[in-house]
Image (cartoon, rainbow, N blue to C red):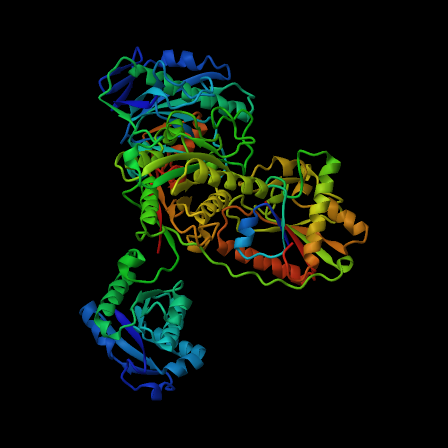
Amino acid sequence: MQLTLEIHPIENIQFGDSTRLQGTTLFVDADDLRRLLLEDTSLIGVEFDIAQPGESCRAGPVFDIIEPRAKGPDSSPDFPGILGPPHTAGFGTTHVLEGAAVTMLREKSPGDSRGATGYVLEMSGAPAAGSRYGSLHHLIIIPHTKPELPDHAQQKAYRLAGLRAAVYLGRAAFNHSPPSSVTFDAIDPPAKDRDGLPRVAYVGQIFSRQRKPELDEQILYGIGTDGMLPVPLHPDEWLDGAVLPSYHTSLGGAETYFYQNHPVITELYRRHQGRELNFAGTVATIASANNFDRERNCRFASNLVRSVLKADAAILTKFGGGVPHTDLSETARLLETVGIKTAVQVTDLARDHKVESALLFNFSEVDAIVCVGGNSTSWRVARAERVIAASPELKEVLTGPLEMESLNVIGVANQQGASRLRAMVY
Amino acid sequence: MRIVHYLNQFFAGVGGEESAGMPLDSLKGAVGPGRLFEQLLGDDAKVLLTLVCGDNYAVENQEEMVAAAVQRIREVKADLVIAGPCFQAGRYGMAAGALCAAVQSQLSIPVVTAMSEENPGTDLYREMIYIVDSGTNAAKMRDVAVMMMNLAQKLVDKIPLGLPKEDGYFRRGFIRDRFVEQTAGQRLVDMVMAKVKGEPFESEMVPTTFSPVRMPPGVKDLSQAKFLLITDGGLVPKGNPDKIQGSAATRWGSYNIEACDNLKGEDYEISHGGYDPQFVRQDPDRLVPLDVMRELERAGAIGEVYEEFLSTSGLANPLSNTRRMGREMAEKAKQLGIDAVILTST
Amino acid sequence: MQITSALPIAKMVGANRLVLGNGIVHVVGDANLSVEQEKEVRRQLVQKALKALQADNTAA
């Protein structure tokens, strides 16, 4: 069985008396959705708002952004291991509300390296143009959790509410025939007539053990990466809810939305369809907390690429901050030593805007580097007409005018391959 | 636009190798390539002064030559200093680079020079100043002059420069962001495919090569040695008295541990945003091993542990910061007569 | 000398006299052990560090 994405384009979201899809407008019955979300007793209330592209509107701090999607009957579960049983993702039909987003807010600023504002969704001006999220129609969820709830439980409540809302909205597409649908050419086994095309794999870090995952943190089929070894995944598993980002925005640059629309995976699929290459498959891995784990993980990952995926080339991306450069580059180096060509994506680490501070590795073999910028881009943003936040204090912080670092605008310096902000060397 | 131009004896038409010993001289108006510069920049551009110096003299007396030249440039209130182009002439390149770097830092006016990639002046000064890639062929004088003047005009008008490739200069090693058409994902696939096909590709970032740190001789007698403990794990006394930043820290602190047998969690906090601090918060000896050091001190295995430990936060910290802090810490250790340092890093 | 859990980075910048620490979150500790066992781990790491400090030309 294969994955079919039924694509329903969304050009407007409105509140209505029932949740339904009408043409390209998604109507949301706020009361009905609230009832569903409040089944989780960690939440004592939820509010909803809508943000449209081009509006003078700012929302934050953002916990996650999710594309509304729902699995059809006789398909793999929605977000297996989290909302459903931990069965393999990527089978059957997925209804996709393309152009829409569920944007889950936090109640307080994470106060980590993303500063006082946390991640901000910006709907107009240059910051919005720099992020895919600026062009989406957002249903924004403002959560209110039970007082005294520990951090991890609060964040779990945000995670579950966001995913549930995304599935709930996606189900509005049931019984609608989609204007278009997507199925990808099977990658395994490759058709006979595809012999000779280079086999290209993707190796993606999905967490960095610089931090211990929170209690209950659900990253891969519901597990938090404790004891995890690199694991081969079918590309459709990434696209269909197997992998979720961390609760920690300090390990930022990843949202559920860009797992569902993974920029590297969809690009490899596109070229696979175009017969430029054979998509060999993927490996999900983690950045390690110590050298011992690093050596094991990097060797596992490179062996999987070589012996299981039998790839000729691989693309590697990192998760989180500086130390994951080490795991990324070591894996790439190991691949290169067995003749597998690599390209890696890093984020610019140079706060002093100097090349010498940009990378944490120097291997002559690891010579194809895509570098996401962010350190030298910020915007003076005007007062927003509408600010969506969970508290009056946060609203005040976000109202503006204020200086907005690109690293704080969600989507701009994305680490999943979606960023168009490039660090250029002058 | 008031311009001062620096030339060696050869390009100034004074003479060849036999004149390489001539000291710095200044001529009124444009000489040689200077006329071309005036032409290219248009009517309001005037080369007021042409400084000429012999290649050997310039290299052998670099400091005096540069000081005298900077003085002349200051006197005529120049808006722009041009040196060369030097092509592959090594001594010329070294002199032009030194002069331009000095003018830029002392007078804060734009400077432009040009050299070939192999010119030792390029290697030495490319990070400090804009050096146009002149290639090695002096017959291309006009093309090189066009690139130099294009760059000069932008610098004088304070127009942001294009990329090294676009504006013809050697990469200085600065990073600036730019929004590009393709996503990083598309660029990754392009790059790996180029590599697979053996086609040329351009990495978006270049690694930095570090020279190994010279290893001082070993400590001969530990029982007489004075130890200093340092950490970059962000351990600071409660309240973070020196306000050491948790990311890209610009400061470090030294904290008294004289009366302590070990470090207590309740006295400290962690200012470091890059790792999970709960374990060190419980017991800071997990980061700064004071308890064990005290044991060794009592047993006479080591001489003494200095009464303070030094601390900063090593997260997302540019080299310009960390080099300075490292130097400062090393100076302190030297002053204190420290024999050995144990530095713990997360 | 440096005790670090990010060995490749220390090597990259040319540091010498390196000892591998016991993880980023507790370089000279181990939260999974009893207090006494943990102290023994720390003792051993410090002993290794002392050895490295005495050496004249090789990293430990």
Location of residue A396 with respect to A46 vertically, above or below: below
Name the residue furthest right: B299
Task: Check the image and name the residue furthest to the bottom.
Answer: B18
Does residue A326 sit above or below A181 in this rendering?
below
Residue A273 on image: x %, y %: 27, 34
Which part of the image, by quadrant, shows the C terminus of chain C?
Answer: bottom right
Whether residue B234 sits left or right of residue A135 in the image: it is right
Quadrant where the N terminus of chain C sits is: bottom right
| Residue depicted at x 55% and y 57% | C14
| Residue B175 in sight in this render | yes
Left or right: where B4 falls relative to B229: left
Where does residue B18 sit, x and y in percent of width and height?
35, 89
Using the rendered view, name the quadrant where residue C37 is placed.
top right
Which of the 4 quarters of the picture holds residue B107? Answer: bottom left
Residue A153 is left or right of residue B238, and the answer is left
Residues B124 and A130: in front is B124
Place of residue A244 in the rendered image (x, y in percent of width and height, measured from the top left): 44, 28
Looking at the image, which is closer to me, A225 or A381?
A: A225
The percent coordinates of residue B284 (x first, y second) are: 67, 41
Q: Give the mark count.
A: 0
Q: In which quarter of the image is residue A265?
A: top left
At horizontal 54% and vertical 20% (from top left) the residue drawn is A147
In this view of the protein, can residue A414 be seen by the observer? no
Of residue A329 and residue A323, the one placed in the foreground of this image is: A329
